[in-house]
Image (tube, rainbow, N blue to C red):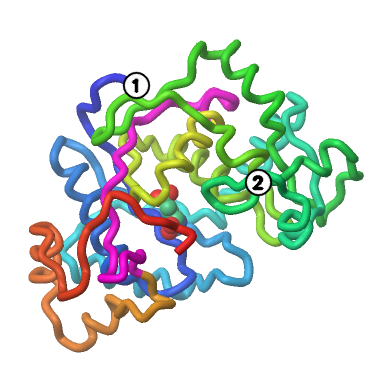
Amino acid sequence: MGVVTDPITRFAPSPNGPLHLGHAYAAIVAHDRARSGNGEFLLRIEDIDGARSRPELADEFREDLAWLGLTWREVPPQSSRVPHYRAALDSLRAMGLVYPCRCTRADIARNAVRMGPDGPIYPSTCLHTPIAPGPDVAWRLDMQRALPLTGELTGELTWRDERRGLQVANPGLFGDVVLWRKDAPASYHLAATLDDAADGISVVTRGADLFDASHVHRLLQALLGLPVPVWHHHPVLIEADGRKLAKRRGAPALADRRCAGESGAALAASLRAARFDAGISLSEYVDMAA
Ligand code: GLU
């Protein structure tokens, strides 16, 4: 976790819907952070989100980024990396750190006794009453076993955010996180951590709304022996009511603005200067439950 001389950053959109202003801001932050040193800006399409994934949107994303005036090197999409994710899951399995789970969201909501940043914490039902592994199970990380092990491997687990400074990792925040999904291959946590390592990302930029997820990623790095980057959690764009900009709440698609003849360069300049459309501002903190 030393000084980052040649920052390698990435923008990693999921093709679940069109990009909007919030994505443009995230891409520009990552791009400019790389260009602030002698670094490199990568594009990675995160297309393993099961039925929600619409890989055909990737072309639209590339056009949007070019319209904003960004240049990048594209690395292979997540869909081409599944064997790599599987191998990591297998090694965690060989270490006795994961267990199969068939619980549904409704089961968890019914049985949970604690709330975490993302909602009810899984009460480790399938750890206490094990189920047989099979093709239709999810795999969860056994935090009770994993946490002491990371201490043994690395000493106190810390990580550094460029804006908020040194952090002591608190990966237990989310309970036994899912690493392998029933309906898709690897979970966000496992895939993003492995990809950032494989792509040589030295500065992981992402919205402050995902700050807590980085605690989990730091743990996975320790367990899997991966290099440790520096993080840069940037503010996120919010609407006048304080909620994060979202396509489902009507944030206009970049593609629509582009096709309507708006200048991408002017939009990028206004984002860099943090001058937004009326009603939109930047916030450090977003209540994801809103
Ligand atoms: N694919 C994720 C998203 O679009 C990436 C988030 C991250 O940077 O880790 O939200």
The front one of 162 and 170 is: 170
SS at circle 1: loop
Q: Closer to the N terminus: mark 1 or mark 2? A: 1
What is the quadrant of the C terminus in the image?
Answer: bottom left
The front one of 78 and 260 is: 260
On whether residue 188 falls in the magenta region, the answer is no
Residue 132: where, in percent of width, then height? 91, 44
Is residue 235 shown to the viewer in this render? yes
**Chain part drawn in magenta:** 221-245
Residue 263: where, in percent of width, then height? 11, 77
Residue drawn at point x = 49 percent, y = 45 percent: 192
Which of the 4 quarters of the picture holds residue 268?
bottom left
What is the quadrant of the N terminus in the image?
Answer: top left
Of all residues shown, which one is farthest toward the bottom?
Answer: 260
The answer to whether residue 227 is left or right of residue 1 is right
On whether residue 225 falls in the magenta region, the answer is yes
Is residue 27 shown to the viewer in this render? no
**Of marks 1 and 2, the one in the foreground:** 2
* Residue ID for mark 1: 1
* Residue ID for mark 2: 121
Ligand 1 - quadrant of the structure image: bottom left
Q: CA distance from mark 1 to mark 2?
A: 30 Å
* Residue type pointed to by label 1: Met
* Residue type pointed to by label 2: Ile
Residue drawn at point x = 57 percent, y = 42 percent: 190
Which of the 4 quarters of the picture holds residue 91?
top right
Residue drawn at point x = 30 percent, y = 52 percent: 73
